[in-house]
Amino acid sequence: QVQLVESGGGLVQAGGSLRLSCATSGRTFSSYVMGWFRQAPGKEREFVASISWSAGSTYYRTSVKGRFTISRDNAKNTVYLQMNSLSPEDTALYYCAARYSNSGTLYSSPRSFDYWGQGTQVTVSS
């Protein structure tokens, strides 16, 4: 079992930055592919970014490329999402997710992930 706890959300003006963190506990963090997803009111949960167990590979949705950066610190059992140049369209509840994998394969479907955090709210004002 893996427990995930997100933090770092908040209210920020358009153009600002936030850094989300996801602290994990349970099984070996370094054996998991980690992902960030988000869900706005009335919309489906959507993929934001994922990172391989070794941090050698990352994958982003098109709309956040060049603005968001996913990273991980396996020594601290933590994954991060640095978000820059935020816009009101980025407003959502952001979730951290984990899937056991040491193959290097990256995933973007919510159905591919086994463990989820409770989410942290990000609100971007115009």
Image: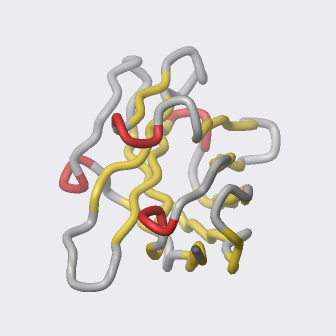
Residue at 55% in and 67% down:
3
27 versus 105 height, above or below: below
Q: Position of residue 59 (x, y in %)?
A: 41, 28
Using the rendered image of the protein, determine whether residue 33 is visible from the camera's viewpoint.
no
Using the rendered image of the protein, determine whether residue 30 is visible from the camera's viewpoint.
yes
Residue at 73% in and 69% down:
8
Of residue 125 and residue 104, the one placed in the foreground of this image is 125
Q: Position of residue 123 (x, y in %)?
A: 57, 77
Q: Position of residue 97 (x, y in %)?
A: 44, 56
Q: Quarter of the image holding residue 105? A: top left
Q: Quarter of the image holding residue 37? A: bottom left
56 versus 102 height, above or below: above
Taking the image as shown, residue 66 lies to the left or right of residue 22, namely: left
107 versus 77 height, above or below: above
Residue at 58% in and 38% down:
67
Of the 4 image quadrants, the one containing the C terminus is: bottom right
Q: Position of residue 107 (x, y in %)?
A: 29, 35
Q: Residue furthest bottom?
A: 41
Of residue 53 and residue 110, the one placed in the foreground of this image is 110
Residue at 49% in and 79% down:
118
Taking the image as shown, residue 33 lies to the left or right of residue 112, namely: right
